[in-house]
Amino acid sequence: MVSEELRAQELFTDGRTDRRTDGRTPDDGVSHKLDWSETKKLLHVVLSGTCGLFSWLFYKWVTKPRPVKTLNASYDYIVVGAGSSGAVLASRLSEDSSSTVLMIEAGGSEEGNFAIKVPLMPFMLQKSNVDWGFVTEPQKHACKGYKENKSFWPRGRVLGGSSCLNYMVYVRGSRHDFDDWAANGCEGWSYKDVLPYFIKSENIQIPELRNSDYRGKDGPLHVSKGYVTPLVDIYGEAMEELGYKTVDSNGEDIFGYCKMQLTTQNGTRCSTAKAFLRPAMSRRNLHVTINTVVTKVIIENKKAVGVEVIKNGKRQGIRCNKEVILSAGSVGSPHILMLSGVGPKEHLREHGIQVHADLPVGQNLQDHIFIPMSFFPNKHLSVSKSDAGSLKSLFSWLIWGTGCMSFSGLEATAYVNTKMNSKNKYPDMQLHFFSVTPPKGNFEEASVRTNMAEEIAEVLANTDRVNKERFTIFPTLIHPKSRGFVKLRSSDPLEHPIIDPNYLSEKEDIDTLIRGIRLILKIADTSVFKRYGVDSSHPNLRIPAFEEFKYNTDEFWEDYARKAMMTVYHPTSTCAMGGEKDQNAVVDPSLRVRGIENLRVADCSVMRTITSVGAGSSGSVLANRLSEDPSNSVLVVEAGDSGECSLSMAIPFLRFNLLKSKYDWEFYTEKQKHSCKGLREQRSYWPRGRVLGGTSCLNGMVYVRGSRHDYDDWAANGCEGWSYKDVLPYFIKSENIQVPELRNSDYHGKEGPLHVSPVYNYPLLDIYGEAFEELGYKSVDTNGEDMIGYSKAQLTTENGYRCSTAKAFLLPAISRSNLHVSINTTVTKVIIENKKAVGIEVIKDGKRLVVKCNKEVILSAGSIGSPHILMLSGVGPQEHLTEHGIQVHADLPVGQNLQDHLFTPITFFPNKSLSITVAKAFSPKSILNWLFRGKGFLSNGAIDGSFFVKTNEKAQYKYPDTQLHFFSITTPKFAFKDTLDKMNICDEFAEVLVSDKMPAERFSIFSILLHPKSRGAIRLRTSDPTDSPIIDPDYLSEQEDVDMMVKGIKFSLQVARTSVFKRHGIDDTHPDLHISALKKYNYGTDEYWEEYVRHMSFTVYHPTSTCAMGSENDKDAVVDPFLRVKGIDNLRVADCSVMRTITSGNTNAPAIMIGEKAADIILQRDSVKDIKERIRNILDKL
């Protein structure tokens, strides 16, 4: 067995294999006596290294292209700044030999700088002649461990810009970063749009990634694995122990642990100057000028015509024929723009600068920050000064491009979400793993190079642990809420601008950092770390500056974060990109500066981000109806996107693609005690629409109003004005029935905006009807006089497309001048003053804003969102709100009374092809049928029919208790597996369900419990509005619900025993595969089916009743029959959360009705008077 000591030394390798005759790599680390043969080898190494060094110097000084000394009077394109973006731009623009390109760099050449070339030496470049040497303003909330509370900001002043100073870490970011940009007006910048450009630039040198479709092999930018220490596997084991997988952070999924990928080539830094600019500098149409400072862009008549520069102490103008492109970085580009007269009008006038465009230049500054957390193992694992400074290390690097000089110290990274139930799809924390033991002198030098306070540097330099083996993990805040700015200090272009990142001004940033620290403490507490003597209780040096608070409390870590935080040198977003109407944007999605022709910005400054409330079914209706009166101004606030460009949303058959997409809130329930036993962690996945139109954009489009007795029961229990007689006219008002045989029915509307169409008919639908007829049930109009019986599905579709409430109600009204719709805007709370709603607080574009209301705030955020917002606003159960430190404005049972429909699937296998298959749906005939006639399989949403029955004829209630849904799609194995994964079904069950034993042809009957007795709750998880609430439906906690579902299953089996089903070879004795969890029960017994129900029941996605309606004296009610929140003026709720009890059937139609009726209540009108007269004969019978 290999000892730990030898194992540690063997791991000192960069993964390369050098073809040596002795079989070892050049850096195998095995100690041995040096005999003459070894001495000859060493001499060979020295001579080879010396020759290599002279060859490199000759190439560098003699053969390399040099920057030009004499400039032309004009160029087609002028690129300002030779940094990461500018170098690429100049290279690509000059590929067209007919265009002349001038690249202007304020700094010098990178080519004589040994520290730039050696990856291990980036720290030595700070405050050198290749660094701008920026320093921030004193920070109020951070940098307390630095001189004058100022942070030092190194930025590259050299060809290649900051790509010559950075730590060479190659990370593209989360796909959701770019999708969020696109969703916020940056059209053409989604992950789908930008991924090909990442691939184009890259030349991946990591063997295991060479065949990945996410990686490029032909680009100029080399991305390598580099040198590794034993720590790289130790980090990985620790992360695995905590449940994190190892991933390619630039591949399919960023979440997890990844060995560092570096922009290096043969062990040397591969800057953008080296990769893009140097190979192009021999082109005659590309001129590069160094040590040339741009003082401003010359703008005439709102058009960029050139630049003014200072070169060799002289000012001169250079004209452009086509465009000026600023690539001077997130400090330089806004600085130049403002000096040129493009920026905040008042600020420019203060400095006597003529204003050409009033734009928010310099605002929205964002930056990543990290905190060092050092640990001290009892074995030599990291790179020390003696490792890096040895002759062996030097010549390994010179000859083979290997060894510890070929890496930057950052050895691995990990992306995590520190909020276990966060709604965010991108990570909030990056971990950097730094495997270097710095010598004592480094701490002394840190005071100079990082601006660290001398008191702290002195303690760090003189502690007894300073020379001990160590490694450091940096928790990095990657989505800060704090925003800063860059402003002019004066109109002198040679004077540095004012830089104020306003670090940690938002408490949420501190909270995220503390969660990151605690995650690192968990890593340090893993068994693998303990094997190496790491003590997680002392992860950092105790110094006087941090002894004010008790160690390891949140107060201690907050103080530590505010003192020890450091910039990661990633400033962005000071010339942010956005849509045409975005007042916070400086450039449009084509990177053109707004209002100025021939001027663009192309660098990190354009990043959008460093990478009634609610427009759902009820809210969309309300917005339309309230804005019909031009004297009312209406604002609709939607947390999600518009959804207009989603093909999966438009085509009914593709609805399952929307699950767990960016249009889905992707909620999960708490672990269920009595149900969901076949789901991972016994948690049910709850998709809810995060898009204009809400869940009407994700649902199965089944239009079911419910039983008349549902509404009569509401009215009888204190909801005056909500009987079936009262609500039927509002159903009719909304509807435009497209089912031919129902066009003349008085129960249906023909003039509303909501199209309700027949399901596409095919043989299986008639087979269902025949089976029920055999059992004595008639075919009915579910939304007509009597819903008991079978009905082919009525769908909210129009010409074969989904007809969401956004399409039906919101989009036709969106051009009204009195209706404003704000997407990607999260409501954090309703502002309540003196028991009166006066406005809302929102987060938009990372900023918190307050919007005042003149009349009312109406919550239509759904049965999860509305109670969540109410509780965050101080309306809810008093004790619960007090627990979370929220001021209580009204003590109401908000979030209680949660109800939802559950279904249990029973699957049947006919011996003929009857169901819809993917081959049928996407056949040329089917596609053409859908495209030109709006018909065919693609126009169906999956549920083709419904059956309503009252299984207990002796019960006193009059409404049906069971609904059957008919799911007639045969899903291919790979797609079925994906669907099961989305539904959170556990692996054991999924494997059985997708096994090859399952017959190919199938259809399912879903037995649905319509009126559950079990009640759940929505509660706050924290007071942070971005944290998902606690959702606990408490499914099947009442035995009566289980008994009812077993009855529903037995009724499904009764359908399967009909002669029509038997004609098609359906065997009712084996409707589903036998699985191990059920084998202890006899098949077909009540015990068997009860266990089946508790394992295999799923939500139908119909949560309701969490802000239930009731009379004034009803203690269980949150709103009164006028939908007013009790005890709070000017605040209403209008969505499914107000339902007294859940309705019989799908809930989208009732949600729309609630929106219609709410509009009449609010506007104090009767918009359905004519409908009442028209259907008087029906109403008189009710």
Image (cartoon, rainbow, N blue to C red):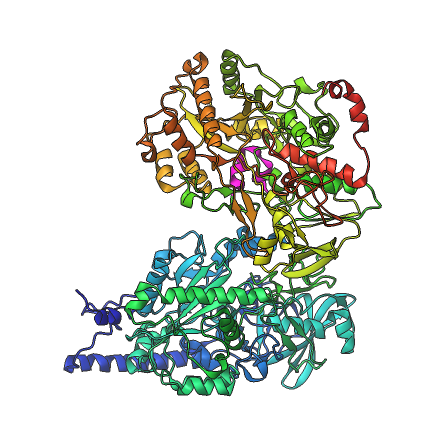
Observer-nearest of 489 and 103: 489
Apparent side of residue 572 relative to residue 921 in the rendered image (left or right): right
Observer-nearest of 894 and 272: 894
- Count of numbered circles in the view: 0
**Farthest right residue?**
631
Q: Which image quadrant for residue 79?
A: bottom right
Apparent side of residue 1143 relative to residue 561 in the rendered image (left or right): right
Instruction: Indicate whether residue 649 is drawn in magenta.
Output: yes
Observer-nearest of 643 and 72: 643
**Quadrant of the image for the N terminus?**
bottom left
Residue 325: x percent and y percent? 64, 67
**Quadrant of the image for the C terminus?**
top right
Q: Is residue 916 above or below residue 18?
A: above
Residue lying at 45% horizontally and 74% vertically, measured from the top left: 551
Residue 938: x percent and y percent? 55, 30
- Residue 260 in sight here: no
- Residue 565 in sight here: yes
Residue 1009: x percent and y percent? 52, 30
Residue 618: x percent and y percent? 68, 39
- The secondary structure making up most of the magenta span is helix
User: Which range is magenta?
Assistant: 646-659
Observer-nearest of 395 and 350: 350
Q: Which image quadrant for residue 139?
A: bottom right
Apparent side of residue 94 relative to residue 317 in the rendered image (left or right): left
Apparent side of residue 198 relative to residue 304 in the rendered image (left or right): left
Q: Which image quadrant for residue 463?
A: bottom left
Instruction: Indicate whether residue 990 is drawn in magenta.
Output: no
Q: Is residue 1130 above or below residue 971?
A: below
